[in-house]
Amino acid sequence: MFKAIYSSDMKSLKHLGRKLWASENSPGALLCFDHLFSDPSLSELEIRTGEQAISFLELFHKYVRLMHQVIMHQKPWDSAGIQKLFAFYPASEDYLILRRGTFIHDCYKGEEFPRSQTENDLKVPCLNFWQHFNESLTARLHQRVLVETDISRVHVFDPCPSIGFCGQCNKNDCHLAHELDVPWYNRRARFHFQQILILHTLQTLPDVMDFPTCIRQRRYVSGH
């Protein structure tokens, strides 16, 4: 897993993420998916068929669900998996130590907190940590959603108007769907259903974005 992350091996990250998800290794799956969906080059991936689009969105839905579980955890410092994933540990009942060079440690840049005895690790109150943790991960997920929104503007489920009105298309360079059979409609419905599930999960997070803005950004869910 760490080799795939270091080398930005997207294919391996997909495979490992699925495998860890199936084995209920949530921290490992989340780490794979977070690196997978953080890469801007995802927009260059081949999503030319309905199956590829559905597969991509299914993975993203898993990622959103895992992030939701972590963000909504009321006491993340009580979870061994979250501690290991974000590299922090309890210093006492009310304080935590944040490892230097980690995501959550970087969220405290510019703030004054006592340094631990281990180089530049930070010692922060649990309640203060929860606020930073929640807000930082919510913002991180928000950015991933914006990337996914752009990527998911695929045209594999856009029907060709000529097929609908004339029964045939005479354009050689037309990339719209022409085989509008039952399997195509089923795949299209499945794709949009996944988008609706993602939208529903996002609306249960605190202060991700207001509902009208979220709808406008994901208006393609309704096909407009």
Image: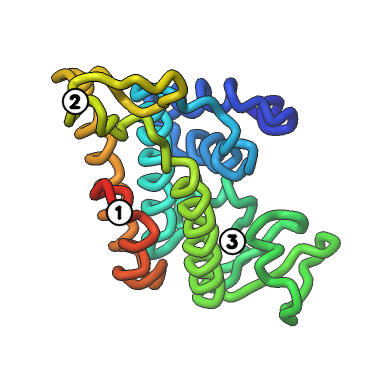
Using a 10 Å C-alpha cutoff, classify the residue at mark 1 as few (fewer than 14 neighbours), some (14 to 19) or many (20 or more).
some
Name the residue rendered at 25%, 29% in the picture: 162
Q: CA distance from mark 2 to mark 1?
A: 36 Å
Q: Position of residue 85 (x, y in %)?
A: 57, 46
Using a 10 Å C-alpha cutoff, classify the residue at mark 3 as few (fewer than 14 neighbours), some (14 to 19) or many (20 or more).
some
Using a 10 Å C-alpha cutoff, classify the residue at mark 2 as few (fewer than 14 neighbours), some (14 to 19) or many (20 or more).
few
Q: Write down the residue under mark 1.
A: 199
Sequence order check, earlier mark of 2 and 3: 3
Looking at the rendered structure, the secondary structure element under dot 1 is: helix
Q: Write down the residue under mark 2.
A: 166
Q: CA distance from mark 3 to mark 1?
A: 34 Å
Looking at the rendered structure, the secondary structure element under dot 2 is: helix
Q: Position of 55 compared to 164: left or right?
A: right
Which kind of residue does numbered mark 2 sit on?
Cys
Q: Position of 66 compared to 192: left or right?
A: right
> Total label count?
3
Which kind of residue does numbered mark 3 sit on?
Pro
When the figure is inspected, residue 118 is found, relative to residue 12, above or below; the finding is below
Which kind of residue does numbered mark 1 sit on?
Leu
Frontmost residue, 42 versus 30: 42
Q: Position of 221 compared to 134: left or right?
A: left
Q: Position of 116 compared to 176: left or right?
A: right
Numbered label attached to residue 90: 3
Name the mark nearer the viewer: 2 or 3.
2
Sequence order check, earlier mark of 3 and 1: 3
Q: Position of residue 70 (x, y in %)?
A: 43, 54
